[in-house]
Image (cartoon, grey):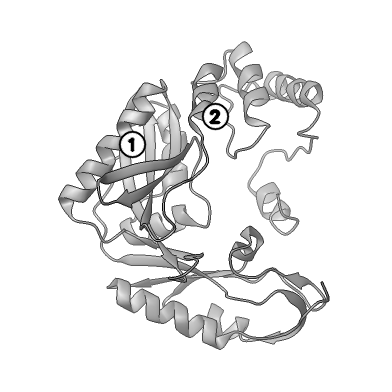
Amino acid sequence: MEADFAPRVEEVSEELLFTDFSDETGLRETIARTARRHDIDAVLHCGHGSSVLPVVREAWRLGLSPNPPAVYERLQSCEEEDRTPAEAPRVSVETLTVDGTHHVVGMTAQRTTGPPYFLVTGHLHPAPLTDDEQKIISAVVEERLTAIGYRFGPAHTQVALLPYGPRIVSCRPHLGADRIPLLVEIARGFDLEAAVFAGLRGERPVVPKASQYAEVGFFLLPEGRLETYTGTEDIAVTPWVRGARFPYTAGDLTASVGDPRARRAYVVVEGGTPEVTRERVAKARQDLVADIRPTAR
């Protein structure tokens, strides 16, 4: 968790605990102790990485995980090196599984730099796909989730759109990153995060059709040390901006496009068409004026 997120998480939490994810024994003891102290009914791992299996194994031992550890082991075994062409369009599919039934919440398209590297610069929801394309992609994703025995929870599946059909690049049991749940809420009026907790009560999601588009665009900064910046206040009060984050202060190191750390700084906009949201993201990027000094390699 990034430092500036901790106070916000703590504000809406009954208790915020810190633990060393590399210490499996300590991590499992923390889960067991906390579950007993607060009489917790279910334990969910909301991220990814090496801590997933220890958390799920302990939660399963306690009878508090809706999925057995084998589900996550199968997901990890399905992960393979991405060999799809960089120029292949990609969409991410957000799903919520309740009692073994997979509900497709929506599909989100990647915005990229284009040739030659196709680095990701943002996401657009909903993805501009035909009904037939959506049906084919949904079937592929649902087949994967069923095959691994996924019984409950959100999943974020990346799919490459190849000439011979869609191919799953990754499938992970968590909400989409890069503010994708916020895009879903803006475009559809559907709170995906709240739906996960409703699903624990057995409530199946009812997902509205999108009434508009929502796009997140990362600020395209060069790598270096930030000297000064202006424009964030103007961006924040722009009517069609629904969220923005610029987690840097003077003296901080910035990351270039393509570096995962570059996604920490972004703007979220709404609009009636993909073209409008693209233009609004471009305007916000233009409004941010940053003086960045290159660092010696």
Mark 1 vs 2, N-terminal side: 2
Q: Is residue 280 left or right of residue 105?
A: right
Q: Nearer the viewer, residue 238 or 27?
A: 27
Amino acid residing under circle 2: Gln
Q: Nearer the viewer, residue 270 or 138?
A: 138
Q: What residue is disc 1 on?
A: 141
For residue 27, say whether it is visible.
yes
Classify mark 2: residues with Cα within 10 Å, few (<14), some (14-19) or many (20+). Answer: some
Amino acid residing under circle 1: Val
Q: Is residue 240 left or right of residue 209?
A: right
The residue lying at 25 percent from left, 46 percent from top is 164
Which quadrant holds the C terminus? bottom right
Q: What residue is disc 2 on?
A: 76
Whole-percent x, y for residue 125 in the image:
35, 60
Q: How far apart in space, not on screen, are marks 1 and 2 (Cα)? A: 16 Å
Residue 102, located in which quarter of the rendered image?
A: top left
* Secondary structure category for the residue under label 2: helix
* Secondary structure category for the residue under label 1: helix
Whole-percent x, y for residue 76 in the image:
54, 29
Classify mark 1: residues with Cα within 10 Å, few (<14), some (14-19) or many (20+). Answer: many
Q: Nearer the viewer, residue 135 or 77?
A: 77
For residue 238, say whether it is visible.
no
